[in-house]
Image (tube, coloured by chain):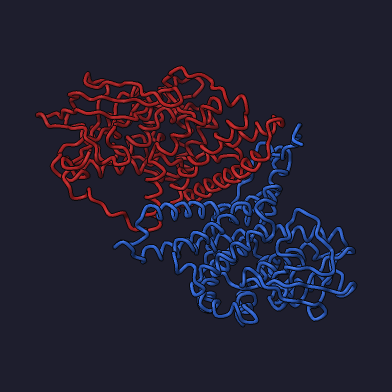
């Protein structure tokens, strides 16, 4: 970002609408998820060994081509962009679907895209990911964010979707390695969000294939995490939208005091406020997807704004959903808790709102105070 | 005559016939009106070309590039945004020809006589009476929150013509002459010290029946046209980042390191993000309108704008420390224009309190969003089938 854009904020025009193709893609993904991975299906699966619906990944990633949206056709992908991937994530967020889409088709894919061309093994791995045949995840905690150097320990906890991965991308002191899952130790942990499995991943030093040296790897990982954070905003948008729709539906139907509870102003105002938040979240999430898709110099700021805003909206929407459902919202049988747990976990994923605000402070020159307190001790 | 090329060529012809550098401002505006380039979506002969509204941008771009004068839309906003669409929809041919040209040119300022001391959010409960007397109506009552009343030549007015039917059904809509001897305008001083608004007392004001808009008793429906047309700036200027009130606070933060505290930093960043998201929301709404897909998001803008202005200006007063304890001046003034970001932080803080009240309170707008956008049921009501005269007041 230049000094001029920092100060005056002259921004290029971002297309914030949905194209017809994007709406078609949305309809296709929504129909697939409704058919194969409804909330009742998930409630039946989340406490089994694997929450992933069998066959769903192949249908979504392979048959529908969703895994290859970010990858150019010459590298085996669909040659689409972050805008389309964002629409897929909106739908996965609405349905709270367990699928390694954000982790493999966005973060790992974007990381490999940064290396493709330089590294033959990265290029080959990328075509596997683009077709959906291979699932790969970056071995970093789900909370890893693009604003810090990444740790290079041999054992990492909180790795999302590692249990579904064929290949693990491991950051070591001497660069980035692709380690086959069979050569790594993956120990499942008990996650707050049962729809996004977490695991402790340990690999032996020297195992796997080296894809890049340390500097190149760090830049590629940063790019992967930035794209992940930007598109996570769309997942959060979809989730918030579902929470609002369900809450409106419930409060229209539920009667107490001889009237629909949704006719009480105290409740209506909360839902109307949530709608305002969702309207804002849509603009912020679309801006982030578009800025990533067009490789805008504004992308880091736009992504940070989208995360700082959308992660709060998703949590608020899920919390309101539970509260305005009353007792039923507190039960295991109602899907509201799936959304609440996903939203709360997403709040930490790829950098908390506070981390992104710190980045904004640096990007737009609103520095924190240097405070000296005299006489305070 | 709807093609962009034709409109561009008409605009260039206007500029050639009336060079802005050597033409009197009012003469230029009259010529523009007569060329149909005032508002191209209006009918031919009434300042328009019956063209799609989006083509107005063609005219505006050409004229701006040529340095042509505009009609200072901020000064005549009520006329342009509220009176004109209602005159167009409900006025007789004679009424439209008499009023629209001086309205658009800015020779005649309009104001709106709707709200009353006893009818704010519940506008339909209004009690100003209009009684038929031969070919005239005689009006008595009190209106309030009337901006521009002290400079207005004409007003749009709603008054009760039948107190014996439920409130929404006994209202009639008129054009009121503000120079009538029965009209008295008094400044209404606000918490800022200024008097942007007025109280208007109507005592035996005579309005010819020819200045009635719509049927007798149908004024509520006519007023909906007025209220729905509250100005939406289609294709308006894009707001730059930090373009609104947040820019003032951010600049102070950058220039005055000694004022910074951690608490203010966290709140400033929260508001910076909210302001940026509001900017993007406005930009998205603008793109939807341009693409011909208007959505209900417009109501989100007003609600968000009110909350943000209040929070940012409040933060600014705190940020300024001892300067925040001072106020520019309390002298009563009657400004012609309202500038939310004008003057000092203290003024902005006080003025922004009105943002969640004027043009529909935040509470009423949230009801509207809940019922019209989300489809939630309305509260049970006890005022719909009761004659106006029997309502509690």
Q: Residue furthest top?
A: B331
Residue A327's spot in the image, x, y percent?
45, 67
Q: Which quadrant of the figure contains the N terminus of chain A?
A: top right
Residue A304's spot in the image, x, y percent?
66, 51
Residue at horizontal 69 percent and vertical 59 percent from the top: A350
Residue B390's spot in the image, x, y percent?
16, 42
Residue at horizontal 35 percent and vertical 40 percent from the top: B42
Quadrant in which residue B364 is drawn: top left
Instruction: Please state the total of marks drawn on the protein image.
Output: 0
Residue B220's spot in the image, x, y percent?
25, 43
Q: Which quadrant of the figure contains the C terminus of chain A?
A: top right
The picture's colour for chain A is: blue
The picture's colour for chain B is: red
From this view, report whether residue B354 is shown above or below residue B20: below
B5 and A53: which is toward the camera: A53
Q: Is residue B238 left or right of residue B217?
A: right
A136 and A193: which is toward the camera: A193
Q: Is residue A55 visible?
A: no
Residue at horizontal 59 percent and vertical 39 percent from the top: B240
From this view, report whether residue B106 is shown above or below residue B359: above
Quadrant in which residue B90 is drawn: top left
Q: Residue furthest front?
A: A377
From this view, report whether residue B49 is shown above or below residue A100: above
Q: Is residue B94 left or right of residue B3?
A: left
Quadrant in which residue A109 is drawn: bottom right
A61 and B235: which is toward the camera: A61
Q: Is residue B17 visible?
A: yes
């Amino acid at each position: 970002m230049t000094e001029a854009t920092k100060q005056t904020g002259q921004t290029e025009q971002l297309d914030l609408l949905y194209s017809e193709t994007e709406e078609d893609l949305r309809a296709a993904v929504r129909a697939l998820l409704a058919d194969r991975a409804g909330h009742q299906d998930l409630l039946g699966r989340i406490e089994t060994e694997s929450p992933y619906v069998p066959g769903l990944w192949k249908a979504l990633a392979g048959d529908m081509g969703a895994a290859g949206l970010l990858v150019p056709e010459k590298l085996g992908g669909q040659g689409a962009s972050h805008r389309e991937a964002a629409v897929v994530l909106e739908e996965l967020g609405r349905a709270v679907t367990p699928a390694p889409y954000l982790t493999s088709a966005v973060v790992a894919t974007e990381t490999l895209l940064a290396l493709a061309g330089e590294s033959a093994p990265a290029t080959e791995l990328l075509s596997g990911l683009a077709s959906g045949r291979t699932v790969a995840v970056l071995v970093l905690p789900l909370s890893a964010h693009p604003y810090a150097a990444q740790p290079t320990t041999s054992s990492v906890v909180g790795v999302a979707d590692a249990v579904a991965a064929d290949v693990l991308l491991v950051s070591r002191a001497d660069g980035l390695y692709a380690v086959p899952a069979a050569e790594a130790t993956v120990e499942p942990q008990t996650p707050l969000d049962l729809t996004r499995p977490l695991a402790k991943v340990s690999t032996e030093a020297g195992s796997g294939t080296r894809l890049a040296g340390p500097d190149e790897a760090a830049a590629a990982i940063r790019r992967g995490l930035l794209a992940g954070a930007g598109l996570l905003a769309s997942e959060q948008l979809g989730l918030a939208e579902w929470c609002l729709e369900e809450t409106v539906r419930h409060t229209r139907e539920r009667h107490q005091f001889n009237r629909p509870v949704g006719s009480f102003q105290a409740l209506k105002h909360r839902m109307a406020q949530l709608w305002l938040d969702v309207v804002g979240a849509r603009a912020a999430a679309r801006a982030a997807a578009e800025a990533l898709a067009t490789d805008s110099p504004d992308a880091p700021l736009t992504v940070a704004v989208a995360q700082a805003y959308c992660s709060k909206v998703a949590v608020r929407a899920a919390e309101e959903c539970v509260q305005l459902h009353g007792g039923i919202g507190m039960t295991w049988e109602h899907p509201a808790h799936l959304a609440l747990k996903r939203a709360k976990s997403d709040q930490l994923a790829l950098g908390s709102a506070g981390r992104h605000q710190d980045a904004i402070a640096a990007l737009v020159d609103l520095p924190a105070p240097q405070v000296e307190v005299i006489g305070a001790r | 005559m709807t093609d962009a090329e034709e409109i561009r060529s008409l605009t260039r012809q206007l500029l050639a016939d009336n060079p802005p550098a050597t033409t009197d401002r009012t003469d230029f505006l009259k010529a523009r009106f007569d060329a149909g380039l005032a508002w191209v979506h209006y009918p031919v002969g009434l300042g328009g070309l019956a063209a799609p509204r989006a083509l107005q941008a063609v005219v505006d771009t050409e004229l701006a590039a040529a340095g042509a004068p505009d009609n200072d839309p901020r000064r005549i906003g009520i006329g342009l945004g509220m009176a004109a669409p209602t005159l167009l929809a409900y006025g007789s041919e004679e009424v439209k020809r008499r009023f629209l040209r001086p309205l658009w040119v800015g020779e005649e300022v309009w104001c709106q006589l709707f709200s009353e001391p006893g009818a704010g959010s519940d506008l339909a409960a209004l009690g100003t009476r209009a009684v038929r007397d031969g070919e005239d109506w005689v009006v008595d009552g009190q209106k309030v929150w009337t901006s521009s009343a002290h400079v207005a030549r004409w007003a749009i007015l709603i008054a009760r013509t039948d107190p014996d039917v439920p409130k929404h059904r006994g209202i009639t809509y008129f054009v009121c002459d503000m120079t009538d001897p029965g009209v008295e305008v008094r400044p209404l001083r606000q918490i800022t010290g200024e008097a942007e608004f007025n109280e208007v007392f109507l005592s035996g004001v005579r309005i010819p029946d020819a200045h009635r808009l719509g049927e007798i008793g149908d004024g509520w429906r006519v007023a909906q046209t007025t209220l729905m047309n509250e100005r939406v700036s289609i294709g308006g200027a894009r707001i730059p980042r930090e373009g609104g009130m947040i820019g003032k606070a951010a600049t102070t933060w950058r220039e005055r390191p000694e004022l910074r505290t951690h608490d203010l930093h966290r709140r400033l960043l929260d508001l910076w993000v909210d302001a940026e998201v509001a900017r993007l929301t406005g930009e998205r709404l603008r793109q939807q309108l341009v693409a011909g897909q208007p959505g209900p998001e417009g109501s989100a803008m007003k609600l968000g704008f009110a909350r943000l202005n209040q929070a940012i200006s409040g933060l600014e007063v705190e940020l300024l420390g001892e300067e925040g304890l001072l106020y520019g001046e309390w002298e009563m003034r009657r400004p012609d224009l309202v500038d939310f970001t004008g003057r000092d932080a203290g003024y902005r803080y006080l003025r922004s309190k009105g943002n969640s009240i004027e043009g529909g309170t935040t509470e009423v707008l949230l009801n509207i969003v809940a019922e019209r956008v989300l489809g939630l049921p309305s509260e049970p009501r006890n005022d719909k089938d009761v004659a106006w005269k029997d309502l509690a007041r």
